[in-house]
């Protein structure tokens, strides 16, 4: 019985650590939703129509950060549908030049 209880406590601790570690990776980034063809040049008001045309031609959705104008390719572009050309705060997991969007909020 003690072994079973100890095993349950150990598993609970492992699940807690995994959850805590994955939450620590989450970042919020302020920036503009743009396309890979225009990149940082599309980080401005009025880029929505141009961005939609570029997306139709095969460009990818990107986020251009406010702080350093870094272009982050979006792993799950459907998360930003309806935010084309908008200034947003994206919360998600940033790895290198990629971002997986968990949530998006208009600025």
Image (tube, rainbow, N blue to C red):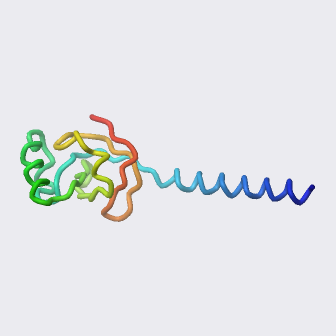
Q: In front here: 66 or 38?
A: 38
The x, y position of residue 50, in whole percent, is 7, 48
The residue sitting at the top extreme is 107
> Residue visible at 32% across and 54% down?
76
Considering only vertical position in the picture, is 49 above or below 15?
above
Is 49 positioned to the left or the right of 5 in the image?
Answer: left
Q: In front here: 65 or 16?
A: 16
Is 33 positioned to the left or the right of 5 in the image?
Answer: left
The x, y position of residue 68, in whole percent, is 25, 55
The x, y position of residue 62, in whole percent, is 23, 54
The residue sitting at the front extreme is 56
> Residue visible at 37% across and 54% down?
100
The residue sitting at the right extreme is 1
The x, y position of residue 61, in whole percent, is 22, 54
Question: In which quadrant of the rendered image does the N terminus lie?
Answer: bottom right
Question: In which quadrant of the rendered image does the C terminus lie?
Answer: top left
Tell how many labels.
0
> Residue visible at 11% across and 48% down?
52
Location of residue 6 by image quarter:
bottom right
> Residue visible at 24% across and 58% down?
70
Is 56 positioned to the left or the right of 62 in the image?
Answer: left
């Amino acid at each position: 019985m003690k072994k079973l209880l100890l095993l349950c406590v150990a598993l609970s601790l492992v699940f807690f650590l995994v959850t805590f570690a994955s939450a620590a990776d989450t970042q919020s980034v302020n920036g503009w939703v743009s396309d890979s063809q225009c990149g940082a040049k599309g980080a401005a008001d009025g880029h929505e129509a141009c961005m939609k045309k570029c997306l139709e031609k095969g460009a990818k959705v990107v986020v251009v950060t406010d702080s350093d104008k870094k272009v982050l390719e979006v792993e799950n572009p459907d998360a930003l549908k309806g935010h084309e050309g908008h200034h947003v705060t994206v919360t998600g997991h940033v790895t290198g030049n990629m971002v997986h969007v968990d949530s998006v909020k208009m600025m």
